[in-house]
Structures are given as C-alpha cells and as structure tokens.
Image (tube, rainbow, N blue to C red):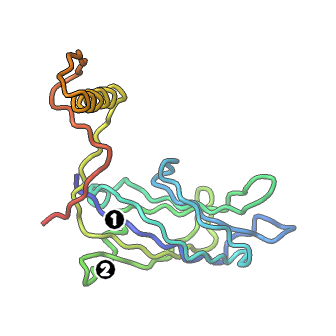
C-alpha cells in the first residue's frame, strides 16, 4: 500500500472570537481526519495568548497516497476554549489533503511543504480569526498492511513452540494433535516499511 508521512505544525491563531467573557481564554486545538476519533491529536492549552494563542505543536500521521490524489479526505482542526465546567467550541478549519498537497512547494529532499492561514469558521458562514499552520508531505513509501492475527492462530503458534521445546528437552518425538485453521496463515505482529524505488 502506497503511503506518505504527513507532518503538521499548528503554529498559532489570531483574532479568535472571545467565547469566555469573565475569565481569560485558554485555547487548544484538536486535529483529526474528518472528525474520526481514532485520528485525534490535541495541542497543549495556550494559557497566555487569549484570543491570539500560539502552540508550535508538531504531530505526524502516515496517510494513504489516495488521500492526496482525490478530493474528500479532510483534515479538520477544531479550536476549543478550555473550561472547568466543560470546554467551549470556538470554531474550526477544514481543508482537503489534495488541496494542501497541490498547494505545497517541492523541497530538495523530495518532500512537499507549505505554510498557510485559513479563516476559522463557526456555523454556516460565521468566521472570525485565522489559524496558521505549516505542513509537509514525505515521499511515497510502501507499507505492508498489518495482518489481522486472531487469538486462535497465536494459540496454534504457542502450541507448536511448546511442542518443539518439549521434544528438544525430552529428546523424543511427541504425538500431539494440533488443530490448524488454515495453511499458509502468516503470523506477523508488526508492519514493515520499504521505500519505493
């Protein structure tokens, strides 16, 4: 499977709407792919900048190359005000990976990178403030899809190991019936990455 490393640095925001009238705004950002909770990452809370927070927070993802080839895969950055009685939504920025990739400048290391500012949207057409971030896409790498190893295959592997250890220790062959649930089932617990040539 063709993949790319995607790095993003959330730098700052400016002129955000003040959603907290009595106390100081403490703002953090939450990054995800189209709101998918499995991809969420959060910045630390900026406690000093109020409506002009700064984070300089960098995080990375490995994304399928299709994300930069077709419209529809969105990077969503939501801004929140941290509060004791529940965080308050400030607004968000949504941008497609394809648009970012197409707008990025090639670098000497074979990457593509960009520095951008997007308006922070709240509701249908409401906007106040800008979100500033930089990003880069690495070159294409080949990632082997992780196999889905079920417990029974690991059990079979464990029985085989125990049998071999017992046979070596006792110096004799054991006649154990080992149930096997399919020929040629790979048991791999990690993914391997190799660079495309």
Indicate the position of residue 75 as horizontal and vertical percent values.
45, 59
Q: How many marks?
A: 2
Residue extending farthest bottom:
108
Q: Nearer the viewer, residue 196 or 190?
A: 190
Above or below 35: residue 128: below
Name the residue carrying label 2.
105
Per the model, the C-alpha gap separating discs 1 and 2 is: 16 Å
Whichever of callouts 1 and 2 sits on the residue coming sooner in the sequence is 1
Give the residue drawn at x 80%, y 56%: 84
Image position of 86 with respect to 119: above or below: above
Nearer to us: label 1 or label 2? 1
| Residue displayed at 30% across by 75% down | 112
Q: Report the residue that reaches farthest toward the right.
A: 22
Q: Name the quadrant of the C terminus.
A: bottom left
Provide the residue designation for mark 1.
5
Q: Residue at x 35, y 66 (%)?
A: 99
């Amino acid at each position: 499977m063709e993949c790319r490393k995607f790095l993003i640095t959330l730098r700052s925001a400016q002129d955000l709407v003040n959603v907290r009238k009595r106390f100081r705004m403490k703002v953090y950002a939450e990054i995800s792919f189209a709101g998918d909770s499995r991809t969420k990452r959060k910045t630390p809370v900026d406690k000093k900048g109020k409506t002009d927070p700064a984070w300089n927070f960098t995080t990375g993802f490995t994304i399928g190359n299709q994300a930069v080839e077709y419209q529809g895969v969105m990077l969503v950055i939501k801004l929140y005000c941290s509060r004791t009685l529940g965080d308050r939504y400030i607004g968000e920025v949504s941008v497609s990976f394809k648009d970012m990739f197409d707008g990025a400048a090639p670098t000497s290391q074979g990457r593509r990178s960009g520095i951008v500012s997007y308006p922070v949207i709240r509701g249908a057409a409401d906007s106040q403030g800008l979100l500033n971030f930089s990003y880069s896409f690495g070159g294409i790498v080949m990632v082997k899809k992780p196999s889905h190893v079920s417990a029974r295959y690991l059990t079979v592997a464990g029985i085989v190991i125990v049998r071999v250890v017992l046979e070596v220790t006792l110096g004799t062959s054991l006649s154990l019936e080992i149930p096997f649930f399919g020929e040629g089932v790979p048991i791999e617990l990690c993914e391997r990455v190799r660079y495309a040539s």
